[in-house]
Image (cartoon, grey):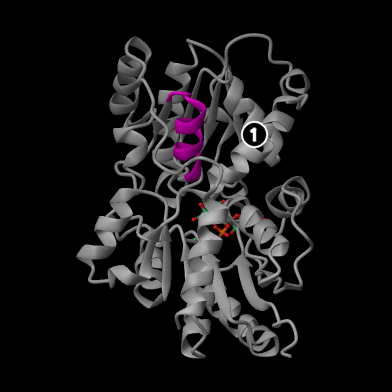
Amino acid sequence: MAGPEAALKILCVGGARPNFMKLAPLVRALGQDALFEPVLVHTGQHYDEKMSGQFFRELGMPAPAHNLEVGSASHAQQTGEIMKRFEPVLIEENPAAVVVVGDVNSTVACALVAKKLLYPVVHVEAGLRSFDRSMPEEINRIVTDAISDLLLVTEESAMANLYKEGIPQARVVHVGNLMIDSLYFHLEKAKNSDVISRLGITGAFGLVTLHRPANVDDPEHLAELMRALDWISQDFPLYFPVHPRTRAHLKNGNVGERIHLIDPLGYLDFLCLMFHSSAVFTDSGGIQEETTVLGRPCLTLRENTERPVTIEQGTNTLAGTTYDGIVSAWKQVRANPKIARVPQMWDGHAADRSLAALGSFLKNR
Ligand code: UD1
């Protein structure tokens, strides 16, 4: 009689803050399924307690089996260092598949290493396109998708993008949004956070995040965005947890009196603030999705989005990146808030569908 089959080892790679809330539900589901054995690798692209450690704890993720501790550097140095350090780990672990998520440098670096060693690559959040190749994330997305064996997508637009790029449809599965699994899983707990009183918030408020290189690396451009936010802050005070990249470029003189700069927040505190906010002003990708599910108005301070479903069905509005554009978009949203619909399969069960897709992919290889 044959003994029980060994569980399939799945190497799950995360590196930067937005990866962790996408990985957490997947790692949890893999751990609960006897078919699989998840092994977590942290590249260390983000390493501050407030950008990384805190998220692992709050999301209930196990400590990574491997931490590559690459830290910050130029794109080439960071990507190359991740590749060099990931290769021996991959050979040692010899998994059945490697899962990479999102669009950060860790995603493309580990996908390249795995593919060249002939390991199957699974890309979570595949197919999103801003069609702006000056964004480092867009290059990471295109390269990762081109070499992935199983592409798990969050929205219809991604299916169409991959089809146009000639990716065989048999490799693509629409599973929904793992980040929204995390949102539903933690929302009740997040609502109990004391962040509102800790920050001394007593009435309506807005929330700001900015970290895209195109928005924050040029001080003059950042100053223009801050002027637009200052105008908006006449309506309510704005709370702005500042990403380390942005902190380096923000000059005190540019910050209006009703804009409160605070340290980066943990996942639960940030979720709590989004839930209670009157509006969110951001250049993040994930926040466009979270505000859509929470039904909060979101002004995206960018010229494009790789997540069009948040505009077509959700609460998101593209405001551009000029003072006039942002102010006029806000006037419009304030007068006519959008009525949101939650996109298909953003229902808290994307991890189950991802596991089913992974199981059937590995069985049919
Ligand atoms: C990265 C991702 C971006 C993602 C963002 C989320 C790429 C190309 N970009 O951008 O897609 O939306 O993470 O935050 O992968 N720093 C710290 N502590 C940290 C991490 C970074 O102080 O824990 C500082 C360093 O000065 C570093 C700078 O932030 O130089 C930028 O970090 P980096 O990882 O290069 O890119 P992000 O801007 O965070």
Instruction: Indicate whether residue 295 is drawn in magenta.
Output: yes
Query: Residue at coordinates 56% horizontally, 81% vertically from top-left?
Result: 83
Bin the neighbour count of mark 1 within 10 Å (Cα to Cα): few under 14, some 14-19, many 20 and up: some
Is residue 23 a member of the stretch shown in magenta?
Answer: no
Can the viewer see residue 8? yes
Q: Give percent across and percent down for residue 239.
A: 60, 25
Tag 1's secondary structure? helix
Q: Is residue 116 above or below residue 164?
A: below
Q: For ligand 1, tell me if the residue under mark 1 lies within 8 Å.
A: no
In the image, 358: left or right of 136? right
Provide the residue designation for mark 1: 270
- Give the magenta range: 286-297
Q: What type is the residue that disc 1 sits on?
A: Phe
Magenta highlight: main SS: helix
Tell me where residue 203 sits by quadrant: top right
Q: Position of residue 336 (x, y in %)?
A: 32, 13
What residue is at 78 percent from the left and 24 percent from the top? 194
Please indicate whether residue 76 sits to the left or right of residue 158 in the image: right
Residue furthest toward the front? 1
Specify the quadrant that holds the N terminus: bottom right
* Residue found at x 52% / y 90%: 117
Please state which of residues 65 and 185 is positioned toward the viewer in this rendering. 185
Point out the quarter of the image occupied by ligand 1.
Answer: bottom right
Q: Position of residue 237 (x, y in %)?
A: 57, 16
User: Can see residue 246?
Assistant: no
Quarter of the rendering occupied by the C terminus: bottom left
